[in-house]
Image: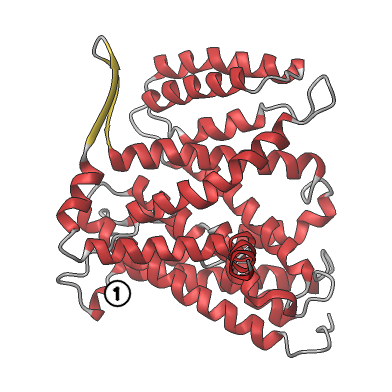
C-alpha cells in the first residue's frame, strides 16, 4: 500500500509531465540510433488514408501526429487561454503586464539571434520562429522540482508567460506558416464555424455537436493550406464557458482532456519528433548555423529577452516583481523559458521538409532546451538560499 501511495503521489506531481516528456525524447534518441531505426522510420512514414469516393485525407503517420494530435493539443491550449482571459490570470490587465511583455521579449530576441546566425541562408532562414517558443509542461515540470523553495508567485509568472508565448506561437503559425492557400476549402470552413458560434451563443449544454463541428472545420482548414492546429484553437474559443444550466462545458472538457494531452498526445509527439540520428554527427555539427541559431536563441535569446524586458519594466515603474521573488528568481524563470522542446519541434516541422535539416533542428532544440532546463534549475536552487528580495 505504501508503494501504491508513493506511485500515486509521483503520477500526480507537477513534474511528472516533464519527466514523461524527457523519457519520450530519450526513447526516441535510443530507437533512432539502434537496430530499431528502420522500424521507427517505417512507422512514421506509414500512410493512413481516410477517403470517400477518392476524396479525403492520405498522410504519413508523422503528419497525422503533427496535424491531427497537435490540433487536440492546441485545442486544450485554447481552452486554457479562454478560461484564463475570462476568469483567471489574464483577466486583470495589471497582472499581465510583466509576464506579457517578458513573453514578447522572449519571442523577439531569440528570433533575432537565429536570424543573425542564418542571415543570407535561404535553406534555413525559414526556421526563425523555432527558438521563440516555450514548452509549458517541461518548464513547469522543472520548476516543480524546485518545490516550495521557490515562491508560489513564480509559478503564476511562468504559467502566464508560457500561455502568452503559446498565443504568440499560434499567431506566428497563422501568419507565416500557411502555404498553397485554397480559398474554396477556407470558405467551406465557415459553415462549421457558424455552427460553433451558434452553439456558443446559445450556451449549449451538449459538448458532442461542438466537437463534431470542430472536427469538420479542422478537415476543411487542413485542406485549405492553413495549418489545421488553428482550427483547434478557434473551436476551443467557441466552447461555452457557462451553459444555460449554469454549468461549464469548457471546464468539463479541459478537466477531462488534460491528462490525455499531457500523458499521451505530447509524449507521442515527442517520441515521433525527437529522434536525432547521431550517425555521422560530430561536436562541430552543433556549430552549424541552423542548430547553433536555435540553441543560442533558446539559451541566450530567451534569457536576454525575458530577463531584460522584465528588468526594464520594473525599473521604469511599469510593473512590480512577483510577490516574494528576487531578480535571481526572475533570471531562473528566464532560463526555463528557453526550454522550447514540443513547440519548437512543432514549428521546426512546419519550417522544413528536408530530413537532414530536421535532424539539425532536433539537435539544436534538444541541446538548447537541455542547457536551459539545467541552468534554470541551478539558478532557482541558488536563489532559494537568498532570504531577502531584491530592492527595486
Decide if residue 339 is in sight here.
yes
At horizontal 64% and vertical 52% (from top left) the residue drawn is 163
Asked if residue 195 lies left or right of residue 344, the reply is right
Q: Is 339 or 287 nearer to us in this picture? A: 339
Q: Is residue 270 left or right of residue 212?
A: left
Reading the image, the residue beneath label 1 is: 286
Identify the residue shown where x is 48% and y is 61%. Answer: 20
* Position in image of residue 336 (x %, y %): 58, 70
Secondary-structure class at tag 1: helix
Outermost residue on the front side: it is 1
Q: Residue furthest top?
A: 53
Q: Does residue 33 lie above or below 264 as drawn?
A: below
Q: Is residue 46 left or right of residue 104?
A: left
Q: Is residue 106 above or below residue 249?
A: below
Location of residue 54 in the rendering, given as x and y in whole percent from the top left corner: 23, 13
Residue sitting nearer the eye, 211 or 383 = 211
Crowdedness near tag 1: few (<14), some (14–19) or many (≥20) residues, C-alpha within 10 Å: some
The image shows residue 161 at horizontal and vertical percentages of 66, 58
Left or right: residue 221 compared with residue 134: left
Quadrant into which the C terminus falls? bottom right
At 72% from the left edge and 85% from the top edge, which residue is drawn? 384
Q: How is the image coloured?
A: secondary structure
**x, y percent for residue 158:** 67, 63
> In which quadrant of the rendered view does residue 10 lie?
bottom right
Q: Is residue 304 visible?
A: no
> Which image quadrant for residue 282?
bottom left
Quadrant where the N terminus is found in the figure = bottom right
Residue at 51 percent of width and 52 percent of height: 263
Amino acid at each position: 500500500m505504501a508503494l501504491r501511495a508513493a506511485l500515486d503521489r509521483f503520477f500526480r506531481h507537477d513534474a511528472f509531465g516533464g519527466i514523461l516528456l524527457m523519457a519520450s525524447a530519450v526513447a526516441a534518441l535510443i530507437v533512432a540510433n539502434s537496430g530499431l531505426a528502420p522500424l521507427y522510420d517505417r512507422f512514421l512514414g506509414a500512410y493512413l488514408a481516410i477517403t470517400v469516393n477518392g476524396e479525403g485525407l492520405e498522410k504519413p503517420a508523422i503528419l497525422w501526429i503533427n496535424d491531427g494530435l497537435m490540433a487536440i493539443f492546441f485545442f486544450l491550449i485554447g481552452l486554457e487561454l479562454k478560461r484564463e482571459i475570462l476568469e483567471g490570470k489574464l483577466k486583470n490587465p495589471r497582472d499581465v503586464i510583466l509576464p506579457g511583455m517578458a513573453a514578447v521579449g522572449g519571442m523577439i530576441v531569440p528570433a533575432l539571434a537565429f536570424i543573425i546566425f542564418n542571415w543570407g541562408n535561404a535553406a534555413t532562414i525559414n526556421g526563425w520562429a523555432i527558438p521563440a517558443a516555450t514548452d509549458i509542461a517541461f518548464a513547469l515540470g522543472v520548476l516543480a522540482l524546485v518545490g516550495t523553495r521557490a515562491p508560489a508567485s513564480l509559478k503564476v509568472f511562468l504559467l502566464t508567460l508560457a500561455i502568452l508565448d503559446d498565443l504568440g506561437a499560434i499567431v506566428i503559425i497563422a501568419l507565416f506558416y500557411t502555404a498553397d492557400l485554397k480559398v474554396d476549402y477556407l470558405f467551406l470552413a465557415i459553415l462549421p464555424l457558424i455552427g460553433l458560434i451558434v452553439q456558443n451563443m446559445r450556451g449549449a449544454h451538449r459538448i458532442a455537436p461542438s466537437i463534431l463541428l470542430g472536427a469538420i472545420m479542422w478537415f476543411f482548414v487542413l485542406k485549405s493550406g492553413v495549418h489545421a492546429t488553428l482550427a483547434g484553437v478557434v473551436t476551443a474559443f467557441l466552447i461555452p464557458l457557462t451553459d444555460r444550466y449554469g454549468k461549464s462545458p469548457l471546464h468539463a472538457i479541459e478537466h477531462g482532456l488534460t491528462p490525455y494531452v499531457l500523458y499521451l498526445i505530447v509524449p507521442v509527439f515527442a517520441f515521433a519528433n525527437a529522434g536525432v540520428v547521431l550517425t555521422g554527427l560530430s561536436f562541430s555539427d552543433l556549430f552549424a548555423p541552423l542548430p547553433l541559431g536555435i540553441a543560442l536563441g533558446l539559451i541566450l535569446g530567451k534569457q536576454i529577452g525575458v530577463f531584460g524586458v522584465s528588468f526594464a519594466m520594473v525599473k521604469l515603474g511599469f510593473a512590480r516583481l512577483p510577490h516574494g521573488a528576487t531578480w535571481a528568481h526572475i533570471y531562473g524563470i528566464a532560463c526555463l523559458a528557453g526550454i522550447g522542446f514540443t513547440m519548437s519541434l512543432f514549428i521546426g516541422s512546419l519550417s522544413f521538409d528536408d530530413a537532414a535539416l530536421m535532424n539539425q533542428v532536433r539537435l539544436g532544440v534538444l541541446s538548447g532546451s537541455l542547457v536551459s532546463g539545467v541552468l534554470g534549475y541551478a539558478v532557482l536552487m541558488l536563489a532559494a538560499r537568498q532570504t531577502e528580495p531584491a530592492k527595486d
